[in-house]
Amino acid sequence: LEIPDDPVDPDDTQIPEETTAENPDTNNNNTNPTPKPSIAEAGDVIGWITVPGTAIDYPVVQTTDNDFYLTHNYLGNKDVKGAIYMDFRNEAIGKNRNYNIYGHKMIDGTMFSDLTLYVQDGTYKRYFENYNIIKYDNLEIETEWKIFSAYVVNLDKEDYYLYTRYSADENFQAFIDEINRRSLVKTDIDVGLDDQIITLVTCNFWYDNARVIIHAVRIK
């Protein structure tokens, strides 16, 4: 990955991460619900994410890079499905303005596959209206976030990077304006400088190197 100069927040020294979460073209037919890990087996598990009304209900892991959990499950075992994982640059909930969480889109509909329902013709309006809450439990408190933006990015046609820290207000405002502009559905949700955003990312089968990106603002 070639890292450009930071075009979003030059006041930060973070390395931007391209919107990854590559999807292996393999069908794993194990559709059994993912058991919640015990404390003893949690390993890198830092939380649990649920999107009511969808099949998204998984542990969230985090490690020192954004590559390991592309090919390993939450227990650290090799797995074509990978895991749902938070950007390695993110800190604890409440310390960053944007939290990036990545997951594969699988042929069998598991992991982050249901994110595509927020950008597909015939389903996106219904999902925005009825299934717009994301619940994230960091193993201490449960937070809630309301979806306000969803869109597809073609990385073959543009460079698109997601950041976790925005120390300058004008750069965070520019981020908010841009993701509102890109959204397929325009909502009346007002996102401001004091808010926190959670960003979910998966790939898309419609064309090569596409990403589905969902943004939600913290409401609890």
Image (cartoon, helix red, strand yellow):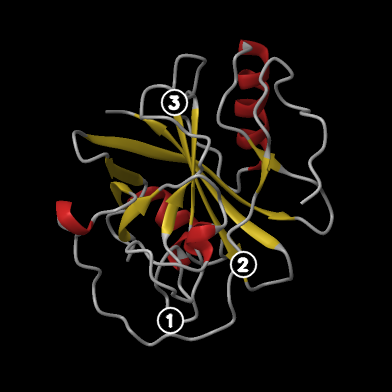
Quadrant the C terminus occupies: top left
User: Which residue lies under the disc numbered 3?
Assistant: 196
C-alpha gap between disc 2 and disc 3 = 26 Å
List x then y, in percent, for residue 95. Answer: 41, 21
Give the mark count: 3
Residue drawn at x 69%, y 41% as measured from the top left: 161
Q: Circle 1 is placed at which residue position?
A: 108
Q: Residues within 10 Å of mark 3 (few under 14, many from 20)?
A: some
Q: In the image, is residue 85 above or below residue 29?
A: above
Amino acid type at circle 1 is: Asp
Residue 66 position, x and y percent, is 56, 51
Question: Can you identify the residue that label 2 sits on?
Answer: 204
Give the class, few, some or many, for how many residues have Cα within 10 Å of label 2's Cα (few <14, many ≥20).
Answer: many
Give the SS element for disc 2. Answer: strand
Q: Is residue 87 above or below residue 43?
A: above
Q: Quadrant of residue 173?
A: top right
Tag 2 near tag 3, CB within 8 Å: no
Residues packed near mark 1 inside 10 Å, few (<14), some (14 to 19) or many (20 plus): few
Q: Earlier in the sequence, mark 1 or mark 3?
A: 1
Q: Residue at x 48, y 63 (%)?
A: 117
92 displayed left or right of 64: left
